[in-house]
Amino acid sequence: MDHHIPVHALPEEIQKMLPEEKVCKYCGVSYLILHEFKAMEEKVKAIEKEMKFYQGSVDREKRLQEKLHSLSQELEQYKIDSKSKTESKIYFKLMLRLEVEHCQLKERMPDLQHSVTEPYIGL
């Protein structure tokens, strides 16, 4: 909080007043600080409101961190699935190519059809 240093001294007539004359008869607060007290109350209210906003920010950030972690895990799973699907596609393409080459080989060498019935897979 800001500390207020008065620029001018209190007028002499106020300095000579009795203490009972300088305080509110209802609440007992000095009239000289009542205004500053009310200003401080307003500052406290504003700071409390700001604190609530930041408390909400902490909760939002926590939820967003959890969501980010979840999405990162999903991304890793998609990468694994994609790699597996890519490997399966490559395998099936190779098998299809091998089958086509086997058929072409049979067509080119009809007299070997009886001896070459299955493709040779040298894996």
Image: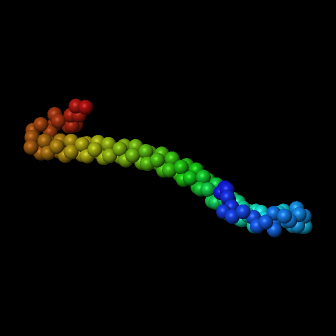
Position above or below: 91 against 3: above
- Total marks drawn? 0
Q: Nearer the viewer, residue 114 or 69?
A: 69
Query: Which quarter of the picture shows residue 23?
Result: bottom right
Quick one: 65 or 46, which is closer to the camera? 46
Please tell me which residue is depicted at 61% across the width and 53% down the height of the picture.
59
- Residue 115 lies left or right of residue 9; in this view the side is left
Who's the residue at 88% across and 67% down the image?
21
Quarter containing the N terminus? bottom right
Estimate the x, y position of residue 95 in percent, counting from the top left: 25, 42
Question: Residue 29: horizontal and vertical position, in percent?
Answer: 84, 62
Q: Nearer the viewer, residue 64 or 9?
A: 9
Image quadrant where one finds the C terminus:
top left
Q: Is residue 60 visible?
A: yes
The answer to whether residue 22 is left or right of residue 121 is right
Depth order, front residue of 70/13: 13
